[in-house]
Image (cartoon, helix red, strand yellow):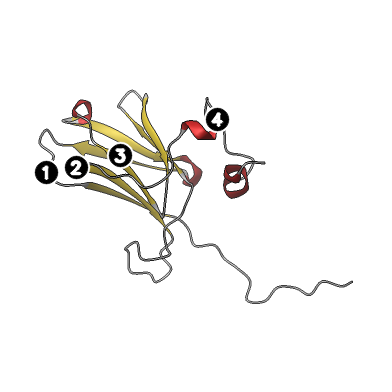
């Protein structure tokens, strides 16, 4: 069982080429980037804070025909996509399928700063106490 299967569950469809085909890890861009934040808002401030980022969630960027342009897994709650010239002056869709969420993003012709899209994941409900296990 891969680490992706442990984190995402068995209902997640493996991409062609396997999990290693989708990049995971920090990204640095020399040009403005499309920054996708996936987080649980534990302190309810509406912002991604330290330790609120959700790791290893697949983020997909698609064009208006829903052709996949790029995919990444989140790392510390972020999936960063350097914006190539081909994305400029276009409407794109950002999808986080595991959360059943998507967003439409307009990339301007002249991008001067990062474009951020936020997806707030539901905070998991945990019991106050766990039941005792009888031997």
Q: Quadrant of residue 106?
A: top left
Give the mark toward the camera: 4 or 1: 4
Kindly identify the residue that appears in the image at 57 percent across and 65 percent down.
125
As drawn, which residue projects farthest toward the right? 135
Residue 114 percent location from the top left of the image: 20, 47
Q: Earlier in the sequence, mark 4 or mark 1?
A: 4
Mark 3–mark 2 CB contact (< 8 Å): no
Crowding at dot 3, Cα within 10 Å, few <14 / some 14-19 / many 20+, comes out as many
Which residue is under mark 3?
81
Distance, label 2 to label 1, CA atoms, is: 7 Å
Residue 14 percent location from the top left of the image: 56, 32
Query: Quick one: SS at disc 3?
Result: strand
Q: Earlier in the sequence, mark 2 or mark 4?
A: 4
Residue 101 percent location from the top left of the image: 42, 44
Q: Which mark is on residue 100?
A: none
Residue closest to the eye, 112 or 66: 112
Q: Earlier in the sequence, mark 2 or mark 1?
A: 2
Which residue is under mark 4?
18
The mark tally for this picture is: 4
Q: Quadrant of the N terminus?
A: top right
Residue closest to the eye, 88 or 46: 88
Which residue is under mark 1?
112
Query: Quick one: SS at disc 1?
Result: loop
Which residue is under mark 2?
32
Q: Earlier in the sequence, mark 3 or mark 4?
A: 4
Give the left or right position of residue 1, taking residue 103 as reference. right
């Amino acid at each position: 069982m891969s680490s992706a299967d442990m984190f995402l569950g068995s209902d997640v469809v493996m991409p062609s080429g396997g999990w290693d085909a989708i990049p995971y890890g920090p990204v640095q861009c020399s040009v403005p980037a499309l920054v996708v934040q996936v987080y649980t808002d534990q302190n309810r401030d509406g912002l991604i804070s330290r330790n609120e980022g959700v790791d290893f969630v697949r983020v997909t960027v698609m064009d208006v025909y829903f052709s996949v342009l790029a995919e990444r897994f989140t790392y510390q709650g972020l999936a960063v996509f350097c914006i190539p010239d081909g994305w400029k002056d276009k409407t794109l869709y950002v999808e986080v399928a595991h959360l059943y969420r998507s967003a439409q993003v307009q990339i301007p012709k002249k991008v001067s700063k990062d474009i951020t899209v936020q997806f707030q994941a539901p905070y998991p409900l945990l019991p106050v106490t766990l039941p005792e296990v009888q031997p």
